[in-house]
Amino acid sequence: MIRVLDDAATLAAAAAADAAARIRKAIEQRGRARIVAATGASQIGFLDRLVREPQIAWDKVEMFHLDEYIGLSIDHPASFRKYLLERLIRPAGITRYHLLDGERDAEAICREVGTALQQEPVDVAFVGIGENGHLAFNDPPADFETEAPYLIVRLDERCRLQQVGEGWFAGLADVPETAISMSVRQILRADAIVCVVPDMRKAGAVRDSLEGPVDPMTPASILRRHPDVTIYLDRASASLLEAGHG
């Protein structure tokens, strides 16, 4: 399902309400919820609203995250561990979480966190879409086939330039070339996916992902194969879509 909201703030509120309802439902039905959280500039408004949603028993939530740079200190402004601690884990009061430590041996982290992730189903995954159409750090051409829960990936130049453009790094040379990423198939194993994509700079990737072929060259296009995905857009990010989305 595609929902187009008027602006980024309205989008964030709607996506947060949806995500909160799914978390509450999982806790009601099973006594706890397992979630996957995304990072990046596009998710800031959404997470800010989500941690303020009422009546979520965050102590019953177990969190995993999508990706992390290899070799980047947790103190670096671009660290996704730092991002999640400051914007989700601490504000919400989540006590069960699994962070991808890119300063340790990356293959060992993929195994350790991947093993924990696959113990039980994920109730809901929060994702975004990159300017190059990536899903997590699965840049084009993405691996649609691997069953591994986490991969070591090489970041393409457009992805790395996006990080500079968003202000996380001073220049391209400062952006790590490799990262740990949740695999495409693992993302699709979540029972539900809430995809948050504001901003005009994502319009081309949104169009290609939703109206082009389902193809590894546009990794986020694979979301169309999931039975329960809601893609939240604002007028800017939806601006290149054909009429009929609302």
Image (spheres, rainbow, N blue to C red):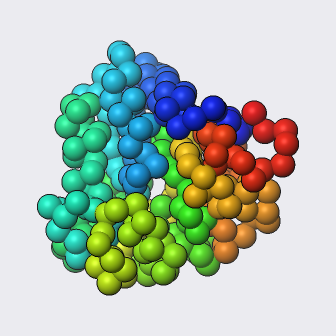
Q: Quadrant of the N terminus?
A: top right
Q: Is residue 188 above or below residue 26?
A: below
Residue 59 visible in the shown view: yes
Residue farthest to the top, as pictured: 55
Q: From the top left corner, tell me how far across and down residue 246 is, in percent.
A: 75, 33
Residue 53 placement, left or right of 233: left
For image coordinates 72% across by 48% down, the residue present is 239
Q: How many marks?
A: 0
For image coordinates 61% across by 78% down, the residue present is 141
Q: From the top left corner, tell me how far across and down residue 209 is, in percent.
A: 70, 59
Q: Is residue 120 above or below residue 93?
A: below
Q: From the top left corner, tell me how far across and down residue 44 is, in percent.
A: 38, 43
Considering depth in this image, is 187 or 76 the residue closer to the camera? 76
Toward which corner of the image does residue 155 lie, by quadrant?
Answer: bottom left
Toward which corner of the image does residue 89 lie, by quadrant?
Answer: top left
Q: From the top left corner, tell me how far across and down residue 20 is, in percent.
A: 45, 26
Residue 43 placement, left or right of 90: right
Residue 161 placement, left or right of 95: right
Toward which corner of the image does residue 99 lie, by quadrant?
Answer: bottom left
For image coordinates 32% across by 54% down, the residue present is 116
Residue 108 visible in the shown view: no
Residue farthest to the left, as pictured: 75
For image coordinates 19% across by 73% down, the residue present is 104
